[in-house]
Amino acid sequence: MDKSQNIFEKACRLMPGGVSSPVRAYRAVGMTPRFIERAKGSHIYDVDGHDYIDYIGSWGPMLLGHANPEVAEAVCQVVYRGTSYGAPTEGEVTLCEMLIDAMPSVEMVRLVNSGTEAVMSAIRAARGYTGRDYIVKFEGCYHGHSDGLLVKAGSGLMTQNVPDSAGVPEAYASKTLTAVYNDLDSVKALFEACGEQIAALIVEPVAANMGVVLPKPGFLEGLRKITEDYGSILIFDEVITGFRLGYSGAQGHYKVLPDMTAMGKIIGGGMPLAAYGGRKEIMEMVAPSGPVYQAGTLSGNPAAVAAGVKTLEILKAHPEIYTQAEMQAEKLEKAFLENIEKYHVDAVCNRAGSLMSIFFTKQPVTDYPSAASSDLERFKEYFAVMLAEDIYIAPSQFEALFVSGVHSDEDIRKTETAIGKALGQWQA
């Protein structure tokens, strides 16, 4: 690890924390991050020559694996003609058509560059459409780093939120109300108190940023009814679940249709690209059609669009990719559960399709408080063994494990062995 250590020390002098995004810093596990040199298929390689089986997949986009040759070729063909024009391209139209065709609730769409931008813009459009100011989010659901979403709940549902990040004005954060995931009563209480002022409710249909937490039966349906009753916009943040739980995302999987959807990750095929869309009358509020302003110089840039179009073409033509990824994920889930029982570990495993998390806690994990009950020291010890066994997972208890469509049987066998070692390390 000499090279990673040396690069990290230099990076810390040049970048905040030595990284471009906080969770990459490995602070939660007390280690030095591995600096990556290249990746191919289900494997990722660091500058010190280590070969890891990768279950981060760039935090979700790599459902087809790293450096998929068809996606790479599509990007290469485009970049030689220019990387950005700041002008419309036919590729944008093709990608938007594919997104609308795939997502049951989306009638019109706008391309942007990141999930944060997609969510921020969707909320602005919802506020412009409804003429209301308040939004509702759920504790433990992450929707990017825009100011109004970096808040935490107070001691009661109606307590004014305070910023969860320095630099966020309290006055702005106070427009965000926080409910408890999987608790419809907490949502009803907010709407009964100030429903006529609530522009939108935003939710990860499967929470994946406090670890993977599945919606209870009836939860999403309940959110749909409450928002309809009060004339508020229901926004699904499908940046992670979109095109991962299936080609039509969580909304297709659970058959609950939101008014608006934020998408990212997989739709860019590993390139910086995201989108937001929804009902036509809402999206027509966005400039230049309407008064809600949103713009971006690099939005819909040709390289990212080419990667996205090719990725979606492959996924649509080969639905067996989803079957393969879920089958491999199911094997890992079984390995976690068998070793939890074998070694009497206080842990639970949650899985939704090819997404999963292990939580080091005794109780079922259904919301943020139960996720937060996890033993972080035990996770740190588990992580260390997995990394030593060349298994590359997120260095945080509260992130997901992503299985791709190219994880091989050999990958899974090696990972199952590592899981046994990691969970068996505390055996008396």
Image (cartoon, rainbow, N blue to C red):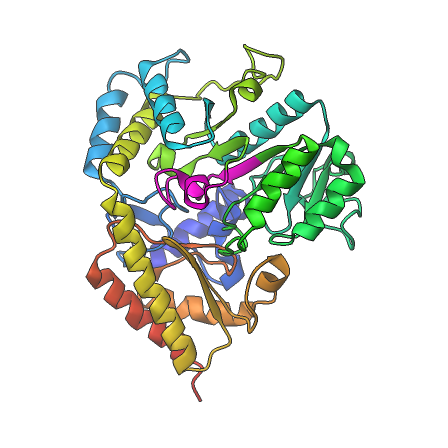
Would residue 229 appear left or right of 239 to someone viewing this image? right
Q: Quadrant of the C terminus?
A: bottom left
Q: Tell me, yes or no, if residue 271 can be seen here.
A: no
Q: Is residue 102 above or below residue 158?
A: above
Q: Position of residue 348 (x, y in %)?
A: 48, 69
249 within the magenta span: yes
The residue at the point 27 percent across, 43 percent down is: 64
Q: Quadrant of the N terminus?
A: bottom left
Q: Position of residue 414 (x, y in %)?
A: 25, 67
Q: Which residues are magenta?
A: 235-256
Q: Tell me, yes or no, if residue 336 can be seen here.
A: yes
The residue at the point 74 percent across, 40 percent down is: 191
The residue at the point 76 percent across, 31 percent down is: 196
Q: Is residue 232 above or below residue 1?
A: above
101 within the magenta span: no
Q: Is residue 370 above or below residue 141?
A: below
The part of the image, by quadrant, that contains residue 127 is top right
Would residue 332 appear left or right of 240 to someone viewing this image? left
Q: Position of residue 161 (x, y in %)?
A: 75, 44
Q: Is residue 107 above or below residue 140?
A: above
Q: Nearer the viewer, residue 314 or 56?
A: 314
Would residue 122 appear left or right of 391 to someone viewing this image? right
Q: Position of residue 76 (x, y in %)?
A: 23, 26
Q: Nearer the viewer, residue 344 or 327?
A: 327
